[in-house]
C-alpha cells in the first residue's frame, strides 16, 4: 500500500550519502558502478555529466514516474519520483548502499551524513507564501502584521530542525519551499508552480563498525514514517492540499 501517492500532486523518496573524502571519479569506476545499477533498473539509460562534474544516470520521465542516481564529488544520490509503491524506491536506495563499499570504496568511517528524504509537491497558481501562511498559520507574535493595510506576504517558508536523540547525531528537518517572488505579487500574475514540502531524517557522522549503511537507512526510514504520520501528514500536508482545493 502506498501511503503517500494521494497526499500531493507529486511525491518523491530520496537517499543521499555524503562522504568526508572525495569519491572516485575515474572513467572505469564510475561506469562500472552505474552499469551495475542499470542492470537492476534497465530503464535508467540516460547517462550524462553536468558542467560541475557530477555524473548522472536517469530514467526518462514516463507517466509521471522517474528514477535517477548521481555521483557528486562527495555525495551519492538516489531518487525516485511517484513510484507505485514506496518499496520500489527504497529497494533502489538499498541497492546503491549495498554497492558503494565495494565499487566506490566508501566505508562507514567515511560517512559524513546519510539522509532519507520524503518530498511532496503541490501545484498552485497564486501567492505561495500567502497560501502557506493561511493554511498553516503564523506565530502569534506575527499576527499583528496581518492587520497592516495593503500588506501581502512575500516570503514565508517555515523550517524546523529537531534532534531525535541526545547526541544530536540523528536529526529531522521539515522545510517548506515556495516559488513566488515580489514581481509576481506586484503584477498579480502567477504561473502554476510547485510548493514543496521536504521532510528529511539525517544521521550525522561515521557509523560504528557494527552498523551498516543499510541498517542505518532502515532506522531513518522508520523514524521518517513515524514522524510523518504523527506530525506532518495531518498538520502540514493535508492543510496545504485543502487550502489549494478551496481557492
Image (cartoon, rainbow, N blue to C red):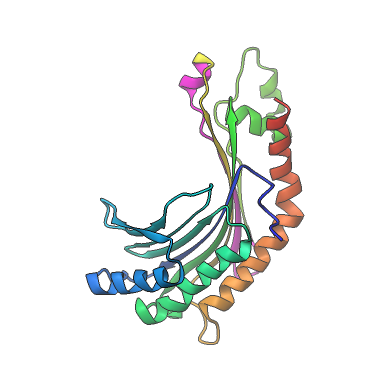
Query: Is any part of residue 57 visible from this angle?
Result: yes
**Is residue 139 something that shows in the picture?**
no
Q: Locate residue 227: give its quadrant.
A: bottom right
Q: Is residue 77 magenta?
A: no
Tell me: residue 20, above or below residue 201: below
Image quadrant holding the N terminus, namely bottom right
**In the image, what residue occupies the spot 69% across and 37% down?**
240
Residue 171 on the magenta segment: yes
Q: Is residue 27 left or right of residue 127?
A: left
Q: Residue at x 40, y 57 (%)?
A: 58
For the point 68% across and 31% down, the residue is: 244
The picture places residue 127, in percent across and down from the top left corner, at: 58, 25
| x and y percentages locating residue 121 in the rendered image | 58, 43
- Quadrant of the rendered image containing residue 139: top right
Residue range in magenta is 163-186
Closer to the camera, 10 or 14? 10
- Where's residue 39, x and y in %? 41, 72
Q: Furthest-top residue in view?
A: 149
Who's the residue at 49% across and 21% down the image? 184
Q: Is residue 15 left or right of 168 when viewed as pictured?
A: left
Amino acid at each position: 500500500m502506498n501511503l503517500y501517492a494521494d497526499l500531493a500532486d507529486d511525491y518523491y523518496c530520496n537517499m543521499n550519502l555524503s562522504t568526508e573524502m572525495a569519491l572516485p571519479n575515474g572513467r572505469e569506476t564510475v561506469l562500472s558502478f552505474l552499469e551495475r545499477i542499470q542492470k537492476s533498473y534497465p530503464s535508467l539509460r540516460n547517462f550524462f555529466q553536468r558542467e560541475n562534474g557530477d555524473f548522472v544516470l536517469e530514467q526518462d520521465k514516463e507517466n509521471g514516474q522517474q528514477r535517477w542516481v548521481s555521483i557528486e564529488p562527495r555525495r551519492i544520490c538516489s531518487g525516485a519520483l511517484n513510484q507505485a509503491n514506496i518499496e520500489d524506491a527504497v529497494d533502489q536506495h538499498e541497492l546503491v548502499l549495498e554497492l558503494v563499499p565495494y565499487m566506490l570504496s566508501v566505508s562507514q568511517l567515511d560517512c559524513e551524513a546519510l539522509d532519507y528524504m520524503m518530498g511532496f509537491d503541490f501545484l498552485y497558481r497564486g501567492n505561495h507564501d500567502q497560501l502557506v501562511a493561511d493554511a498553516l498559520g503564523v506565530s502569534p507574535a506575527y499576527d499583528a502584521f496581518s492587520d497592516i493595510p495593503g500588506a501581502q506576504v512575500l516570503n514565508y517558508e517555515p523550517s524546523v530542525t529537531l534532534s531525535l536523540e541526545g547526541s544530536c547525531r540523528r536529526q529531522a528537518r521539515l522545510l517548506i519551499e515556495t516559488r513566488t517572488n515580489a514581481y509576481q505579487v506586484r503584477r498579480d500574475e502567477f504561473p502554476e508552480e510547485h510548493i514543496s514540502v521536504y521532510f528529511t531524517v539525517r544521521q550525522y557522522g561515521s557509523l560504528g563498525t557494527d552498523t551498516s549503511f543499510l541498517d542505518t537507512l532502515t532506522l531513518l526510514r522508520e523514524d521518517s514514517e513515524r514522524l510523518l504520520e504523527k506530525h506532518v501528514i495531518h498538520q502540514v500536508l493535508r492543510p496545504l492540499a485543502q487550502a489549494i482545493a478551496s481557492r
